[in-house]
Each structure stands twice: as structure tokens, then as C-alpha cells.
Image (cartoon, rainbow, N blue to C red):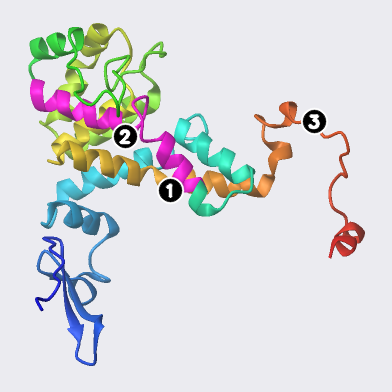
Amino acid sequence: MSEEVIHSRIWNERPEPDNPFAAAQCTVSGYDVYGDLLGKASWIEYLYLLFKLEKPATDTTRLLETLAVAIANQGPRDHSIRAANCAGVGGSTSASCLMAALAVGAGQLGGAREVFIGMEYWQHCGKDLELWQQHISNPPRDERADVWPEMQHPPGFDPHGASCSTPVKQTLQALVACHPGGALAWLEQHREKLENLADCPLTMTGVAAAAMIDLEMTADQGEMLYLLLRLPGAAAHALEQREYGWRKYPFFGDGLVLTNDPGPLTENSKKNHS
């Protein structure tokens, strides 16, 4: 009988001599994870290695790390964090909070799919402003409309925004400092022209899409990374709101009326319930 083999370009294992189900050595793209990388490589360097199967250059590490900080927590105004907060304050499990954040943060309005489509725009238009104008005026249609509905706005731009927000401009400036001369630098130079073409301001997803292009990620990789890198803020906010409880959550308090509210638990009531 032939031996079952898992095919992976990312990971390779050598089993322990006394246990074929336990690994003695684990390698990623030729690097011994627990022998060469542990204690030497940073989280961001290892993350890049997993996706690209090569060690990042110093400026690439700075670029990815700066992007990771910028999008790690976009605050409770962010839709995905709001979803995690709702799960947390409702007493859902930690996994449910993160799944709520992923589900909402996967979409086409400030979500990872918007980054994916934005990267496709970059791949098609590059640094050609005329092509951007054509693409924004006549956007391509997704062949799988049953999975993703047609975009209602140019990807990377806020259909409800009045002007480009300060954090977006600060993030773009910081990323350009890490990687001058690429898509990010062109975006900074032509931001206002692109905003006029889109008739709405640039957003963090638009900046992230350009950053993923400069990181030489594919659109699929950029989408996945954007989902992953936004989870820290969702996790922290969900834990905070779980601690506060629904009484202090502004989106539930006025909508819930208890006809027989027992009030907060006291020490005596806790003993009676036990």
C-alpha cells in the first residue's frame, strides 16, 4: 500500500525516531523553525516567510510591520470590530467573537474583499492615471455574482466620506517612508486626482491594497493578510466589552426592556444562586 503524503511547499517535517506522529524538526522554506528561527526571527519576518517562502529585506520588514500596526485596531467605528464587540458583550465565546469579526471584515465595504479588488485594479492599471480613470468609470464585473455582489463604489475609497481622514494620510506617509518609489509613493502623489475620479476619499483599504502590491503579494495573499492583521483589535475590544457587559453597551441598552429585572448580583444573591 502506498504511503499517504501531504504536499506542501511551505512546511516539511522530520519525525522523531521513536514516534512517527511527532516532529523532531520542522522547516519552512529550508529554515529550521525551532532551531534557526526561534528567538532570532521576528513575528513579521516569519509571517512574510510563510507567505512568500523567502526572507524579507529590511525595508520589506519595516513596510509590513508598519502596515500591521496601522490596521491592527481601527477602533469600534470599524464594522468588523463592532461585530466582535456585539459577540463579546453578548457573552459569546472567544472563537465566536473572532469569527464575527472575520465574517464582517471579509466584505467589500472596508473589508478584505475590497483590498482584493483594489489589488486587481493595481495589477491592471499600475501607475497609469488614464487606466485608473477608465477602470473607475467602467469597473469590471465579477464573474461570480452569486458569491460577491457587484461593487457599489470604487474599491479603496469611502462612498460616505467627506475628505481623506488624518489616520489614512498619516499611514500612507509612514508607508511611503518605508518603501519610496513604489505603488504607495505614486498613490500619495496622485491621491487627490484619484479621489476626484472616484468622487470619494481614499480609505485604509486603498492604502493597504497599494502596500500589498509593494510587498509583492498576490491578491489572494493580500486578502488573507488583511483578514489576519486586523484581528488583534477585534480580540482586544471584544474582551473589553465582555467585561463591561451589555448595560454599558450603547447599542443594546435602549433596545432591551426587562419587565422583571432582578438587578445586579449581590453577594447574597450569588449564594442563593449557587
Q: Which of the two residues, 193 or 22, is positioned nearer the viewer here?
A: 22
**Is residue 80 rendered magenta in the image?**
no
Estimate how packed mark 2 is, as few (under 14), some (14 to 19) or many (20 or more) residues with alpha carbons within 10 Å: many
The residues bearing labels 1 and 3 have C-alpha atoms spaced at a distance of: 33 Å
For the question of whether residue 74 can be seen, the reply is no
Q: Which residue is mark 1?
A: 232
Indicate left or right for 156 with 48 as reference: right
- Residue 225 picture quarter: top left
Q: Which residues are magenta?
A: 97-125
Q: Secondary structure at mark 2?
A: helix
Q: Amino acid at mark 1?
A: Pro
Q: Can you tell which of label 2 and label 3 is closer to the viewer?
A: 3
Q: Which residue is mark 2?
A: 112
The residue at 25%/7% (across/down) is: 196
Q: Which residue is mark 3?
A: 257
Q: Position of residue 187 (x, y in %)?
A: 19, 22
The residue at 11%/31% (across/down) is: 182
Q: Amino acid at mark 3?
A: Val
Q: Position of residue 226 (x, y in %)?
A: 30, 40
Q: Which mark is residue 216?
A: none
For the question of whether residue 204 can be seen, the reply is yes
Q: How many marks?
A: 3
Mark 2 or mark 1: name the one nearer the start of the chain: 2
